[in-house]
Amino acid sequence: MTSHSTTSHAAWVHTPERSNRLMLRVMTWISLRLGRRAARGVLHLIAAYFLLFAPASRLASRNYLQRALGRPVLWRDLYQHFFTFAATIHDRVYLLNRRFDLFDFEVHGEDTLRRLLADGNGLFLMGAHLGSFEVIRALARKDKDLCVAMVMHEDNAQKINAMLAAINPQAVQDIIGLGHIDSMLKVRERLDEGCAVGMLADRTPGNDTLYPVQILGAEVHLPSGPFRMAALLRRPVLFMTGLYLGGNRYAIHFDTLADFSAITRDQRDAALQAAITRYAALLDQYCRQAPYNWFNFFDFWQAAPTTIPPKT
């Protein structure tokens, strides 16, 4: 595998998550005033709105679903994709307010998670914009022995924190913003406390080294930054996803991804490549298993810019 750095990012890097933020604001207002049962009826209207009046997102959904479903995409497929997105955003409101009694969670790989956390050194959880990360954090809120912190870039952290604080001020306590001089120290502190530190590793808003991988039969370029952080801090890494199954049901998966705890410096690059390749394979697996849970509503498969890697 080869890698390249970029000083001008692919267009998808700059795509703001306006739809996500708009959806959360709308669903928070509806949910807190109408209740979950009544509010879920509104989801159909919201899904229809995005289907009809968000042409760029609709095109991205169609392009993705053609790969994931392996057949011609119907309008009902597009609708189901937007509805699934709306449902997970809606449920986030209740999860943040600790209404776990409303949901049915099935957890796969929890024994692996707890075994790796048992030594007290913490670990990284690498996810993607696939399913709901909030159901992962819900596990930690239900179990006082389990600590999950979320790392995100500062611009996103500020926007998400403002929204979460409006729903439940306690929800922002375990979010670490990158971009500060002490960001890495805060991450290390949480790891040393025995926490699982979660990151979404399928996008980057800044300069990063991108690795070409295969997902759904096509080449994409994934950032190495999240995995490089795990390698520098010498921690094991699990893949995580919380897939929406319909109704009030979610399937949470933890899969072994990499273990950087014993990697030497000269082994690091090969270990990074192996980890990113494994991450891509798991994304491929779960996109095929639960295709409507993919929430990158832009052209994820467009080519990355071709530049010459800097000399080191």
Image: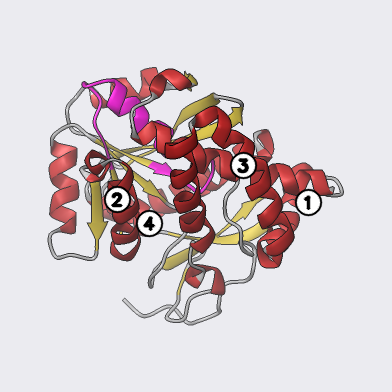
Give the secondary structure at mark 1. Answer: helix
Q: CA distance from mark 3 to mark 1?
A: 24 Å
- Tell me the CA gap for discs 2 and 4: 23 Å
| Three-letter amino acid code at the position of disc 4 | Asp
Q: Quadrant of residue 98?
A: top left
Frontmost of labels 4 and 3 is 3
Q: Earlier in the sequence, mark 4 or mark 1?
A: 1
Q: Residues within 10 Å of mark 2 (few under 14, many from 20)?
A: some
| Front-most of residues 95 and 174 | 95
Q: Residue at x 34, y 32 (%)?
A: 97
Work out how far the residue at label 4 is from the one at label 1, CA to CA, in angstroms: 33 Å
- Res 66 label: 1
Image quarter for residue 257? top left
> Few, some or many C-alpha atoms within 10 Å of disc 4 (few <14, some 14-19, many ≥20)?
some
Could you give the CA–CA distance between mark 4 and mark 3, rounded to whole angstroms? 45 Å
Which mark is first along the chain, 2 or 3? 3
Determine which residue is flagged by label 2.
151
Could you tell me which residue is drawn at 71 percent across and 59 percent down? 58
Q: Are marks 3 and 2 in contact (CB under 8 Å)?
A: no
Would residue 227 be visible to someone looking at this image? Answer: yes
Disc 4: which residue: 269
Q: Which residue is mark 3?
A: 43
Residue 10 screen position, x and y as percent? 53, 74
Q: Nearer the viewer, residue 122 or 62?
A: 62
Q: Earlier in the sequence, mark 2 or mark 1?
A: 1
215 vs 229, left or right, is right
Q: Which residues are the magenta region?
A: 126-149
Question: How far apart in space, not on screen, are marks 2 and 1 (Cα)?
Answer: 32 Å
Judged left or right of residue 72, residue 113 is left
Residue 115 placement (x, y as % from top left): 30, 20
In front of the other: label 2 or label 4? 2
